[in-house]
Image (cartoon, rainbow, N blue to C red):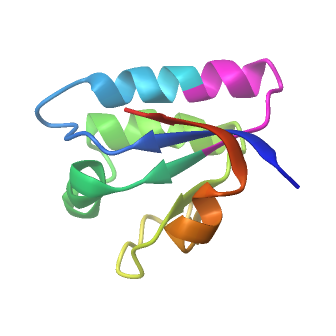
Amino acid sequence: LIKNILVVLSSDPLKSDLYEQGIEVTLNLADAEVSVEAYFEGEFLKALKEASNDSIFYKKLKQINLYEVKCSSNDKALSLAEDFDLHLVNPKDYFSQFKKIVVF
């Protein structure tokens, strides 16, 4: 089963607000009922591991979860708050399931 779109968040949220565009795109697609999922990697993932639950970008990220968009990463050590649903995946297998991959 080929899924539609994967939004990859990889830019450093502390240095750039590119990730906000990624979140916006994800929310807009979910709102339009397009099949979309989110994947966290790189600098974004690093910052996320160190973020507190009340940091701005964590709060923005929570919106994706509220839309019930599946969020994934390949990092076993990443444990977000219990109220954030994050899946552990193998990127190679996972990425091949999508028609389009957009990186922010």
Q: Residue at position x 57%, y 72% from top?
A: 89
Q: Residue at position x 79%, y 28% from top?
A: 34
Please identify the quarter of the rendering in which residue 4 is found: top right
Residue 80 located within the stretch drawn in magenta? no
Q: What percent of the width, then of the height, locates residue 69? A: 68, 44
Which residue is nearer to you in this view: 97 or 9? 97
Could you tell whether 22 is left or right of 34 in the image?
Answer: left
Q: What percent of the width, then of the height, locates residue 32? A: 79, 18
Q: Residue at position x 79%, y 46% from top?
A: 3
**Above/below status of 76 relative to 56:** below
Image quadrant holding the C terminus, namely top left
- Residue 74, visible in the rendered structure: yes
Please identify the quarter of the rendering in which residue 92 is found: bottom right
Could you tell whether 40 is left or right of 52 in the image?
Answer: right
Magenta residue span: 26-37
Which residue is nearer to you in this view: 61 or 35? 35
